[in-house]
Image (cartoon, rainbow, N blue to C red):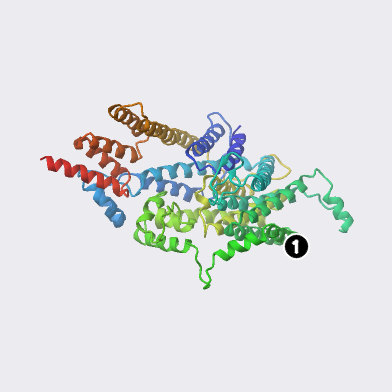
Amino acid sequence: MSSALLLTLLCFAPLAFGSTETWSVAAAELLAALAILLHFRPGARTTFHPVPGLLPLLLLLLWLLAQSLPLPPALVQILSPQTAAVWQPVLDVLPPDTRVPLSLNPQATLTEGLRLGSYVLAYILAVQLLCSGRRLTVFLSSIAGLTLFIAIVTMLQRAFAPESLFWLRPVRSGLGSFGPWVYRNHYAGFMVMTSPLLLAACLLRWPERDGEEETLRLLLLRLFSGSGLHLLFGFGAMAAIVSVFLSQSRGGILSLTVSLLVFVLLLAWRLRERRLILPLLAVLLAGAWFNWDGLLLRFQYAVDPSGGLRDDRLLIWKDTFRIIADFPLTGTGFGSFAAVFPGYKTLADELFYDHAHNDFLELLADGGAIGFLLAACFVGTVLRNGWRQIFLRHDRLAALTAIGAFSGLAGLLFFSLTDFNLHNWANGLYFFFLCALLAAAGRARQHHRRPLETADAYPAAAGWLVFLAAAALLLAVLRLHGGALKAEGAYRWAKSAAAEQSLSDGEKIMRMTELLEQARRSDPWNGLYPYLLGKIRMRQRQPELALPLHVEAARLQPLEQEYLRAAARATKVLEGRK
């Protein structure tokens, strides 16, 4: 049952429009928690297989939670003077013994904690399940089939309904949506990770040679023999590659090329499959041919007539370096980039930038040197372990799985230099899934149900700890995301009440106050609701009630200057009355 839930999660996350909305994120995180609870339920006889990089990953999660903990202002001053400076205007209107966190957007940091916690649980569970050769084969085939489905439907949708997401949701032209993703680079990032898995699934089912000398006739006979799954997955790999070229994602095309190049080199080096180099190069050229003119225009746009780069990413990175310089050790708090960046932005436009378009720089800005080093230790441990498995294991399933996963990770890490795929919920999940495939390849055997036996399994108590962590995650998701959804509903009703013509002004204010109080209780980490309640109190000429509400809003979101200005206005009115 736990394997079915994990597979459901892997299919749901990309199909739910990349899992970028509160409802889809909550559903995905609940699926991850439920799968773990079922696998490690009391009474279940399970072996806890070692998880590469688990220690730095857990320390990273603890560091994220530590950023959300209220600390004495003196300690914050020592750890991050710039963070203390940001909090100081808020502390001036709060009681002297108030504590503040290192994060400059505590709500966003808590949300990131749920996301990372879900990834960690899914990673642990996938490592446990995929050590079985049978399950590994099923998952590899299922993900290959899902990728084929998404690629084919996406190309059909692009031809017949280009301004919609899978024919289900309309989108404005010019947003760059593609497939189920609103952002084409995230579609490309998904294909960069899964295309090597399709190739691995194809080669895994490729009919073996019978020892005779290879001729064109024998090659064609082997090509069209067997179950035909190798042809299906081979076609799927070609469709996925072509779809990335059709998306016109420049970073996606370059990253896909890197991913496939790593795959071919490892395949030629490890399994002596050099004959695949020319076919894969032909597929790359075919993909470009399908949209050659548009592709050239996309690459030409990145360079101005004088020969300089005109991509706004360069200016975003320059401003992000300034954030890193101000918060070098502790960062601004995971998930806080969108709130912090406007104060450092030098771009002359009115656009809102919620990410740095470089996962490495954003990690440094949000998590500081501490968060970056912990994440680097995790990724380095996983890649080192996977590289070792590629050359140690002689089992074909293990070797092909490791090569496909390693290639997908290499491609996405290259893509992360110019985009933020790891901040898309679905793509981040698949990054950790590929890490689990690398780890599982060290134990899985193609023709055996049981994994390789080793003496480094964790004690049984580890399963209980994971079970308790999953239970805590489930409750946290229900409280944080469930409360946010409930609050959003109450807020929408409050806006409807404000526009209701049949209500008097007094009835409107009473109804809005009631609904906003409900939203405030449901989502106590969002400063918007106390701020709006404070505005209503000021309109009712009750500054003594408005001031604590505005102060609460500023404490929750210290970078929202309007909240502080509202508190200052309420204070000025109160002083005028004296």
Q: Nearer the viewer, residue 349 or 5?
A: 349
Of all residues, the one furthest to the bottom in this rendering is: 306
Q: Amino acid at mark 1?
A: Leu
**Residue denoted by label 1:** 278
Q: What quarter of the picture does the N terminus occupy?
A: top right
Residue 450 is situated, as x and y percent measured from the top left of the image, at: 67, 40
**Residue at position x 54%, y 41% from top?**
122
Mark 1 nearby-residue class (10 Å; few <14, some 14–19, many ≥20): few
The answer to which image quadrant residue 282 occupies is bottom right
At which x and y percent is residue 199? 70, 52
Q: Is residue 83 visible?
A: yes
User: Residue 142: x and y, percent?
Assistant: 67, 41
- Tell me if I can see residue 451 in this picture: no
Q: In the displayed structure, does residue 2 sit left or right of residue 66?
A: right
Check the image and report above or below for 417 versus 12: below
Q: Quadrant of residue 7?
A: top right
